[in-house]
Every structure is written in C-alpha cells, then in structure tokens.
Image: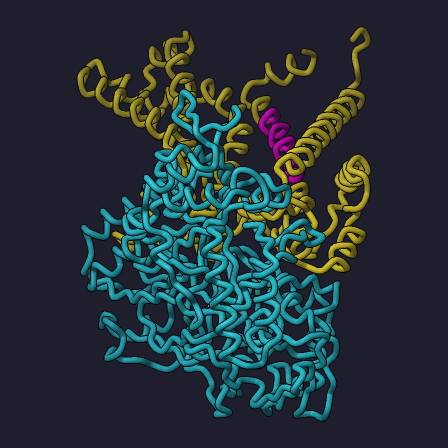
Chain colours: A cyan, B yellow
Amino acid sequence: MRRLPLLAVASAATALVLAACSGSPAPDPSSPSDAASGGSTASDGTDAPTQAGGTLVYASGDAEPTCLDPHVGGNYPQALISTQYLEPLVGRAADGTTTPWLATEWTVSEDGLTWDFTLAERTFTDGTPFDAAAVKANIEHLQDPDTGSSTGYLAVEKVTEVEVVDDRHARFHLSEPDAALLESLAQQWTAIQSPTGLARGMEENCLAPAGTGPFVVTGWTPQQQVDLVANPDYVDATGEAAPPLLDGITWRFVPDAATRYAALVSGEVDVIDNPQPDTITAAEADASLGIEHIDNPRPGSVNRIELNSGQTPFDDIRVREAFIRSANPGPGIEALFSSTAVPSFSPLSSVEPVAVSREEQFTYDLDAANTLLDEAGWTERDADGYRTKDGARLSVRFPVSTNQSVPAEQALFQQIQANVKEAGFEVVLTPLDLGAWYAALGAHEYEAVSAPYTKVGPDVLRILYHSSGTEPAPSGYFANHAYVRDAELDALLDEASATQDAAQRADLLEQAQVRILEGYYILPLYDQQNHFLVRGVTGIDTSNPVATLSFQTASLTD
Amino acid sequence: MTTTPGPSRRALLRVAALAGRALLVVWVTATVVFLALRAAGGDPVEAVLGGPGSQAGPEAVAAARAQYGLDLPIWQQYLLQLWRVLTLDLGDSYARRTPVLDLVLSALGPTAALAVSALVLGWLLALGAAWLVSWARAVSGRLAPVGRAVVAVVRGWEVLASVLPHFWLGAVLVALFAVGLRWFPATSTPGSLAGLVLPTVTLAIPLAGFLGQLLGEGVGDAESRPFATTARARGAGPTRVFARHTLRHAAIPTVALTGWAFGFLVSGAVVVETLFGRPGLGRLLVDSTLQRDVPVVMGAIVVIALVYVLLTVVTEAVEGLLDPRAATTGEDR
C-alpha cells in the first residue's frame, strides 16, 4: 500500500501551498448556491448569513457502500449515508436514555418478553404509510437470511415475532429478555424502510431505499456519487413538519484523505469525513480557512489493542499485564494525533454514560513488567534482546488492517512495538488488507489485534467479551478477539441483558468492565475516531445514536 | 512455409494467431487472478454478505455459498470461472449483485477517456521535446552553448519526469493548481472537462519522460544517417528534416512502445483514480480486490488484457504503415 508516503507528501505539499496562499477569498466554481452570493467568508458559522436552498456536497472517505439499504450487511459507511433518508424507531439522548422517534411510546412486560410500541403518523417518501405492518416487514427483512444482515441481524436476534396489534401499535415478542433492545433499535442499521420498497427485491432496493427521512435517494453513479433531494413532506421526531433547508445533497466518494481536504479548502465540497489528524490541526490553526471541526466519537466500544488470551503467551495474565505496563501509548497518542485523540482507560467509548475508566491500571511501569515476565518464566534473553522461555521467543503476531487503521494509528503501533521491546517482547506487525486481516483473525494467527466495533450502548461488551463470542460465525468471524472465556463475566453480562432495572443494569455493566480491565485483556487507546471538517455550513445535527451527521436542519452560508 | 500462401490464407492465419494469443493471455490472466485472490486470504462469501468481517447468520452464509457456487471444490470453482470468462458471461458481482459486464463497461469509459488523453498529451510533450532537441542540435553551430544547454535541460527533464511517482505528482498538482491557484478541481468527475486536466497531466508527465527518451534516441540516430544528411544538403531546415525524415524513423520503436504504455497507464489509473476520486477500471479493481469480489476483479482484468492484445495488434499495424519492411518481413519471422 502506498498510502503512507502519499499522505505524508500530499499533506506536506498542501501545507506549503496553504501557508503561501491562505487568506485569499475563495470563489466556489462547483457549488451553485455559492455562485449566487457575494464573497463573504464563512467564519465560525453562527453569525454568517445563511440562505435556504442549495446543494451540499459531502465527500466521504469511508468505503463506498455496495448497497444503500443498511439492512444488507450493515457497516458504518451505510450508517453515514442512510442517516439522510432512513430513520430508526427510537433515538438516544446524550445521557443514554432512549428518546421517541418513529415510535412515540413503549412499554415492556414484567417478564421482559413483550414490548409494546406506539407508532407516530408518518408516510414513507414513496407514499407508503408507516404503520405496524411496516415495522413487522422490516424486522422480518432483517431476519431473512437472504438479506444478509450482520449488524442488524445480531441486534434483533431475540425477537421471535412482531405482532400487528393495529396500525399504530406493534408488539414485539422476545425469546428471552433483552435490556439492549431499544439501543439496538436506535441504530441506523435497523432503521425502518418502506415495505413497498423492500418488496421490489434486493437489487432494486439497494439502489434507492425509501424511508421517512429528510432526503430521498434519486440516483447513484458507482464510484462517484449518490444524489439526494430534499423531502418536502418531512416530519421530524417531535411531529413537526420540518422540510430541509437544503435542496439536496451530493454524496461523493473520495478515497484519498489529502484530496478530500484539498477539495474542502478549495471550496469544491462543503463537508468531509475521516480527515487526517494533521489536517485537523492545520484547519484549526488557521482561522482564515473558515473550517469547523466536528469531533463526534462513536458509541459502544473504544479503540483498543486486544490480547489473545486463548493461546500462548497471553494465556498468562502476568504476560498480558507486562505487555500493557510496558506499552506506554500515551506520549505516542499525543504526538501522532496532535491532541485530536484523548487516551482512554475504559473498554467503552467516553460517550457511554456507564463507561468505567481506570487510569491507574495502565500507568507505564517497565520494572513491574520485567518482574512479571520473570515470574512468568520468560527469564532468558536471546541475542536480539527478546525474552525466551524453553527456547521459544516471547513473540506477538499483530496483524494490522490498513483499511481500518489510519497512518497515525499504524505509527502508534510501531511506537508500542518499540516500547514493549524494552521489556523483551517481539511484536511482528503485519499490514494486511481487510479480507486477509479477517482471515488471519479467523485462523487465530494473532496474539494482538486492534479491531473497531460500533454498536449503540454498553451491550457491546456482551458481543466483544462474552465467551459465546469466541464461537466463530459461519463466515469464520468471531467478535471476542481477546478470547475472554470467564464464567463470572458471562454471568454479569447475561444478567445485565436480562434486567429491566436501569440502575441495576448499570451496576452489573460496571462490574463487568472492571473484570475485563483487571484481566488485562485489552489496552484501551482512544474513542473510535469520528471527525468531520465543515466549511460554510451551519445547523448540522450530530445527535444520531451512531454519531453520524444529519443535514436536515443544515444550511449553506457564504 | 514452402508454398506461398494466398492473401486470404495469410489473413486467416493471422486471425488464428491473434485469437490464439488472445486466448492464451486470457487464460493466463484468469488463472493468475484466481490463484492470487485465493492466496491473499479472506473468504469471498464475505463480499456477498456485506463485506469482510460479516457476522451474518448460518442460513445466510449457506445460502450465499450455494448461490455463487462457493460450496464447490476449489478446482470446480476454477473451471467455472474459466468457463464464464471464455463464454464472456462474467456473472454477477458478489458485493453489488449487478452484472459484472455492466460494472466493467461503465468503468471502462472514464478510464479510456483518461488513458487516451494522457497518451495524446504524453506524445505531444515527447514530440515537443524531441523537436526542441533536434532544433537545438541543428542550430548549435551558431549557438553552441545555448544548444547544448537546451539538450541537457530536455534530457534532464525526461529522466526526471520518467521517475516521478504518480501519487506524488498528483498530490503536488492538486496542491498547486486546485488549492493554490484554483484553476482546476481537486476531484475529478467524468462529466467535467476541467476535472480531467490534473489526472491527465499526472499520468502524461512520466509517460512523456519515457516516450521522449526513446524518441530522442531515435531522432539522434536518424540525424546521423545519410538520408538526413542528404536532406540537409538539399537545404531543408531543421524543422523540415525533423518532421519529414528523422521523426518518421524515430517513431517506429516509440509506437511499438505505445502498447506497453497502455499497461503503464492502466496501472497508473489505479493510483490516479483513487487520488482524484474518479470512477474507472483502476478504482473498480482496488475496491473489488479489497472486497474479494472475485467476478469483478476477474472481469476487469480480462477486459484490460483483451484491450492490451487489441492495442498490440493496432500498434503493429501502425508500425507496418510507418515502415513497410516490418509488415512484410515481420510476417515470416
């Protein structure tokens, strides 16, 4: 992969040119909305003149979805774009409580097996009414093997049936209690689509799913862009008519980070995602660029290095602790991410209200690490300075996904590699593309790995650390990469899933996190990075449960 | 050959040889692609189920395997792929579920536009450089130091240009002409002519370096030949000698290189299309390889290989036009 030198050179070149010509006002040749207005430069956005209409251009660096229906598969790029046209049953407030959206009210039975939802009055953009039958059709679509849903399928796997009580009331029957049901239904991957649209078949529905959202998909040119126009009849979560101020969105796919930033600076595009840390700092340092930075960390789990406790050498807790005590990622995070990422000491994202943070467990202590390794029997050192035991080297295979780990993160892994060498660990970093990386994980050819996982709510702990997560899915994938098989932890997670009492659930989940942290299975790094750079746009809504942006209330300034 | 083949027989043989060559190229590329995608790891069924790392249920995985023949033994999958390629039934994309042919054809247009414009610009730049050198040599009697300096600068530029990596060159051009001067957009959509400029220049400059070196060598060689001397003796100026005599001589090996240049442009397109966010075969290949979308990778590479074979035939024909000796002797070699 040539990305690293490419990015380094490109951002250096960009920085040079920016330094030379910053401050010159920017006429925008590509955006029709800007052509009409004068040369006022957008500042922080709050007092800039806004105008209705215009087409916003969004440049995404995430992979282009292969299907615009997030039920099919179910990954973050699909969540990003489908936020513009599909809405979930419920939302989620910053404090973790569930808020009404397409469902206005809900009650759960004493035994936790029956959930009643009251539905809002809405119409899908294809004219189909939103009702209980539509909800039923959507859950069945998620559960249909032909749909090939992964995220959504796992989210609703405990739902045995959706009963249509009447148009406005749907009743979910569960096989076992699921305290995380509302969090699962808040995810963009379980958002509700028109049943008429679904009935067209997957091929057609993938091209233009119809929802109740503020925009409508009108066209998709592969590898280039998806065209969206405003839904004039849009009704928001509060039940108010709220058509978007924009005429539409051009959703472009621009894989190269330096090009995306160049396009933003030169006014070709209005919003970019996945900016590199150095460009975020550059944009923040130069106010004359008029670029706003949105830092919207993803919910669920934190980015972390997981140590495979299922095989040697990390099947010994002392060796795991020694690795974590000698890794010292803090200075590297600060230097490489230029303070756009904050070190984490929790298994959960900082946006999760129940996240437990235990900094004291992760303080750098090389002496302690050496003592632990001596105790664990790794007492010899070979000619290269690595520890050995019975002739075997203390070696850690660390496959790195070049698609998911940005250059700064890959550089951080190299620093950790150098740090743990002091204690006698050999870390073999292998850069792999996504397919080969998952194959290596499926074959257990790793001792350490960093794998992102996004799910709304602390229930992500159950997916990542319950021993059932060590059983591979039929595709070979298993989510519990740390290979945690701890009956007591399983019990805590099962109980948390079954309880209806919020306080009790929080307490159980906090205990579970302490158990994970004290087992030294993971080295938390930072929240799952989710940065956006914006120029000349105000009113962007960042409150979607999976931390995507909504442009329903956005308008172009300038 | 003992008997003299008639014109129709000769044409038939030619077509048969061409078809044989095309088949061989297709078989080799299809086999290499199949083996390489297998060796790279990852399960193609993941592509069917929404990308690598899919956590789809057991029924979904079983259904996908059966639907795409992924439950067959590997040699049967290989034969199936070969059969599909041979019958030009490229099948459906695992990931997009649309026919591979549609995907490849819609990506072919933008890449062809880019490759052709880069080839034209590359040739123009190389011709300009060759003419400049030729002119400088011709007048160096009067302006010896200037002439030598011009030759040195052009040679230096050609060597430098031919080693510039596409990703670096593209990034610099974006920084200068998109962010700095704002003459051209940083991203490129096929509908926009302005958007074609920076990707074209990015591909054309290293190409012009290669072509220019070869063309310059040929021109220098031709200038010392008797026919050039004769032309000059008859009073032809440097430009006339260049255009009428030496260029024609020098162009033959350079034209032969154009088939190779196409391969160079396609591999460059992989980088340039990703850099400029432009659709095309290169980007389709990258995306599909990452997804282990075997039919699309196979289809794209087979189409590229066929175009390559076709271009080689065309360049041979052009060579024949430029130098009739190649056409007659080449046949019986």
Left or right of B322, for residue A282: left
- Indicate the quadrant where residue B3 lies: top right
| Above or below: residue A199 compared with residue B149 | below
Observer able to see residue B116: no
Left or right of A426, for residue B168: left
Residue placed most toward the observer, A290 or B112:
A290
Magenta-drawn stretch contains B161: no
Could you tell me residue A235's position as x and y percent?
51, 88
Residue visible at 34% across and 13% down in the picture: B232
Observer able to see residue A338: yes
Residue placed most toward the observer, A176 or A14:
A176
| Above or below: residue A124 compared with residue A167 | above
| Quadrant containing the C terminus of chain A in the rendered view | bottom left
| Above or below: residue A495 compared with residue A368 | below
- Indicate the quadrant where residue A131 lies: bottom right
The stretch of residues the image draws in magenta is B301-317
Residue visible at 38% across and 71% down in the picture: A32
Could you tell me residue B317's position as x and y percent?
61, 26
Residue placed most toward the observer, A445 or A58:
A445
